[in-house]
Image (cartoon, rainbow, N blue to C red):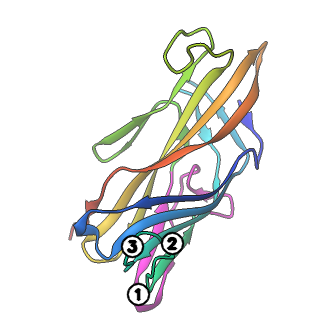
Amino acid sequence: MSLAAGAFSLAFISIPVTDPAAAPIVGIEVKNVKNGAGSFAGGPLAGKMGIQGKGIVCLLGTGFGCNAGPLINLTVPLTVNGTRGVGLGGAPSAITRPLGIRLSVEGNPWTAGTAMLGTVTIMGFVHGPASGGAATAGQASGVVQLVTPTMLSTSIANIAAIPSFGILNLHFVPEPGTFLLLASGVGGLAVAGLRRRRV
């Protein structure tokens, strides 16, 4: 199964970070998201598809959001040169800001199987239109849910890593030997929790 570049785009995702241990981090934003070309095969269905855009760690806000008064925000690309990053894997992409504050994003390929970060897991799946499962009940199309674990890491305070998952839902009509893609989009970005830096 293949997906052409630019099949979906998303202008903005905003996720609050409310754990007091995360201070001065108040949230995460992802902006200008779109997909690169991807190809998926195997059992479970899996493969690489880069996600372009930028991740922002919002700092020192009086309310949530990078526009809510933070003095410094850390921004890092989700993928680098289409070769590594979210949806691809490889070495982390990183940026260092003044005062030596570092932010990096480490991605992994997509899977319809199980994705895991620490003790948190999320499941992908493939349901044909005739499966009778809750995900496809009453639909003429089938559904593929691909997931990818992603780690945002910082050198700020006690927080070393902010685990999250990308979720991509695809609806398709099975045709002989191929999939006719009806719709696609990023289903969400979920923050799995916060992990404290180990010294």
Q: Position of residue 23 (x, y in %)?
A: 28, 74
Question: Which amino acid, mark 1?
Answer: Gly
- Residue 128 vs 148, above or below: the answer is above
Q: Is residue 13 left or right of residue 25?
A: right
Disc number placed over residue 122 in the picture, else none: none
The quarter of the image holding the C terminus is bottom left
On the image, the x and y values in percent for residue 1 come to 71, 29
Residue 26: quadrant of the picture: bottom left
Residue 123 position by quadrant: top left
Q: Nearer the viewer, mark 2 or mark 3?
A: 3
Q: Residues within 10 Å of mark 3 (few under 14, many from 20)?
A: few
Above or below, 185 relative to 83: above
**Which numbered marker is on residue 63?**
3
Tell me the residue at 65%/33% (across/down): 40
Q: CA distance from mark 2 to mark 3?
A: 26 Å
The answer to whether residue 170 is magenta is no
Which is more toward the observer, 6 or 176? 6
Q: Which mark is residue 94?
A: 2
